[in-house]
Amino acid sequence: MEITETRVSPVEKPSGRLKGFASVTFDGVFVVRGIRIIEGDNGLFIAMPNRKTEFRCPGCGGWNVFHAKFCNRCGKEIAMSQPHDKNEDDPKNYHDIVHPINNEFREIIQSHILNEYQSETQGRKTL
């Protein structure tokens, strides 16, 4: 699989850890958007697109985010046995929508994105 295009959009005035967004096209036919470029304790890294984990209300079947105490649809209180209490057995709050299967491919994607990010941000500094 070949990365045929990498687009990076640095955050205009980064005030926190988020430094930009990226999209990557594979083989000219598949694109992944919403990849975040983040400043970590050990430098820049990428985070794949994700969304909040949801579960169904036992009363009405409406979807609710992981830590909801009341149903967004019917307003019914969600029992303590439902997954809104954070403990070791609970699922994650967020899960990746897409992600590389192994670290080798993650490193390839990350290196393409971070190289493009460095080029983009250095180009802006010289203007």
Image (spheres, rainbow, N blue to C red):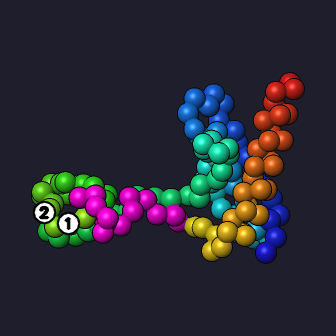
Viewer-nearest residue: 24 or 90:
90
Q: Residue 60 in the image: state x and y as whole percent.
A: 17, 68
To which quarter of the image does residue 35 belong?
Answer: bottom right
Picture quarter with the C terminus: top right
Q: Residue 126 in the image: state x and y as whole percent.
A: 87, 26
Q: Residue at x 62, y 31 (%)?
A: 14
Disc 2 to disc 1, C-alpha distance:
6 Å
What kind of element bears circle 1?
A: loop
Viewer-nearest residue: 50 or 81:
81
Q: Is residue 107 left or right of residue 60?
A: right
Viewer-nearest residue: 66 or 104:
104
User: Residue 82 shows which numbered tag?
Assistant: 1
Q: Residue at x 51, y 59 (%)?
A: 50
To which quarter of the image does residue 75 belong?
Answer: bottom left
Above or below: residue 30 compared with residue 75: below
- Amino acid on which disc 1 is placed: Gln
User: Residue 79 shows which numbered tag?
Assistant: 2
Above or below: residue 127 compared with residue 26: above
Q: Where does the magenta region start and end?
A: 84-97
Please tell me whether residue 35 belongs to the stretch shown in magenta. no
Q: Residue at x 14, y 62 (%)?
A: 80
Q: Residue 37 in the image: state x and y as whole percent.
A: 64, 47
Residue 60 in sight from this viewpoint:
no
Picture quarter with the N terminus: bottom right
Above or below: residue 120 compared with residue 125: below
- Amino acid on which disc 2 is placed: Ala
The secondary structure that most of the magenta stretch takes on is: loop
